[in-house]
Image (cartoon, helix red, strand yellow):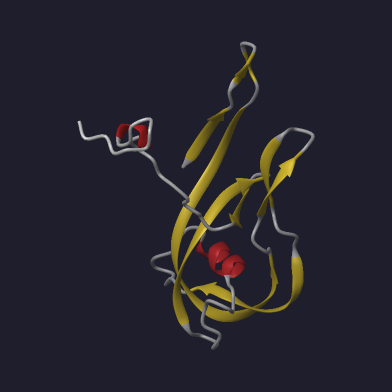
Amino acid sequence: CAHLIRLPFNNGTLIETRREDFLTVSCDCKVGTGTWKYPVGVAYWDDTTKALLHKRGEWQSRSYTLGLSAAPPSDPQPFCDTCCRDHYDAKIHPAATDAEYVDACRMKRIDGLVSVIEDWKLIALNIIPNSYFVNGDGTPNET
């Protein structure tokens, strides 16, 4: 899904408008081996642009235990090759070769390529503000 980010106005001038593509996929994976992968992309603060950006992991080429898409050719799962390969973590996924597991990945288009980034981390989701339930002095609002 695409997100259009509009940052606040500064003296009547829009500071930044940015469109970002995020995707969350669930994949059938299995443990295998390979010789290359991208580590999970990370968020960082860019002091020049004053923006929170994502950076792709650096290409790594060596022998790896990693995830492979376990989807049958008759039912391909878009982006699962990338999700299974780049999101595999031996600490939380099975380690035995050919062991199957289900994985979910948060992905984002970075420099034109869909890349695995950090997992979602929901801290709070406030639909109704706390002030609706609590009076100014901290006592419950009973009306």
**Compared to 67, does 127 lie above or below?**
above
Quarter in which the C terminus is drawn: top left
| Residue 82 left/right relative to 132 | right
In the picture as drawn, the residue positioned furthest to the top comes out as: 12
User: Total label count?
Assistant: 0
Please give the name of the residue rendered at 53% of the width and 76% of the height, measured from the top-left corner. 92
Frontmost residue, 75 versus 26: 26
Please give the name of the residue rendered at 54% of the width and 88% of the height, measured from the top-left corner. 96
Residue 55 placement (x, y as % from top left) = 70, 50
Frontmost residue, 13 versus 29: 13
Please give the name of the residue rendered at 64% of the width and 61% of the height, measured from the top-left corner. 40
| Residue 100 left/right relative to 108 | left
| Residue 112 left/right relative to 69 | right
Frontmost residue, 15 versus 123: 123
**Compared to 63, does 87 lie above or below?**
above
Please tell me in which quadrant of the rendered image residue 111 appears. Answer: top right
Residue 84 placement (x, y as % from top left) = 54, 68
Residue 21 placement (x, y as % from top left) = 54, 42
Please give the name of the residue rendered at 47% of the width and 54% of the height, measured from the top-left corner. 24
In the picture as drawn, the residue positioned furthest to the left comes out as: 143
In the picture as drawn, the residue positioned furthest to the bottom comes out as: 96
Frontmost residue, 9 versus 56: 9
Residue 39 placement (x, y as % from top left) = 67, 64
